[in-house]
Amino acid sequence: RESQRVYALLRKQTSAYVKKKIIQIFEPQYPLISNVRGQMKKQIIIKIKEQKELPQELRKAIMPLPAGWIVDVDPISII
């Protein structure tokens, strides 16, 4: 539920970039290991095409995420 809410917020905040195909935001999915210490995890993958920095709208959407969210820029693996 929370991941769907954040996904919708990210899509709304970055809609101009999504329409121009600069950003792709994938729906929340369970990672390969989704249960860690009794808590279920989901991941929202965001792909940004040819940008050195996060677009300002995306940065504004990510900054107020509640405690417990992890933002991994340029992850080694998404498994």
Image: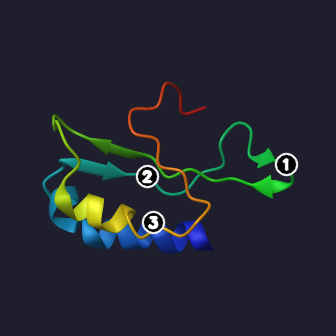
**Observer-nearest residue: 5 or 20?**
5
At a point 22% along the width and 57% down the height, the residue shown is 18
Query: In the figure, is residue 11 to the left or right of 41?
Result: left
Residue positioned most to the right: 38
Nearer-N-terminus badge (3/2): 3
**Observer-nearest residue: 21 or 71?**
71
Query: In the figure, is residue 47 to the left or right of 49?
Result: right
**Observer-nearest residue: 61 or 1?**
61
Q: Position of residue 12 (x, y in %)?
A: 30, 73
Callout 3: SS: helix
Q: Which residue is mark 3?
A: 7
Amino acid at circle 3 = Tyr
Please identify the quarter of the rendering in which residue 53 is found. top left
Q: Which residue is mark 1?
A: 37
Q: Which residue is mark 2?
A: 26
Nearer-N-terminus badge (3/1): 3
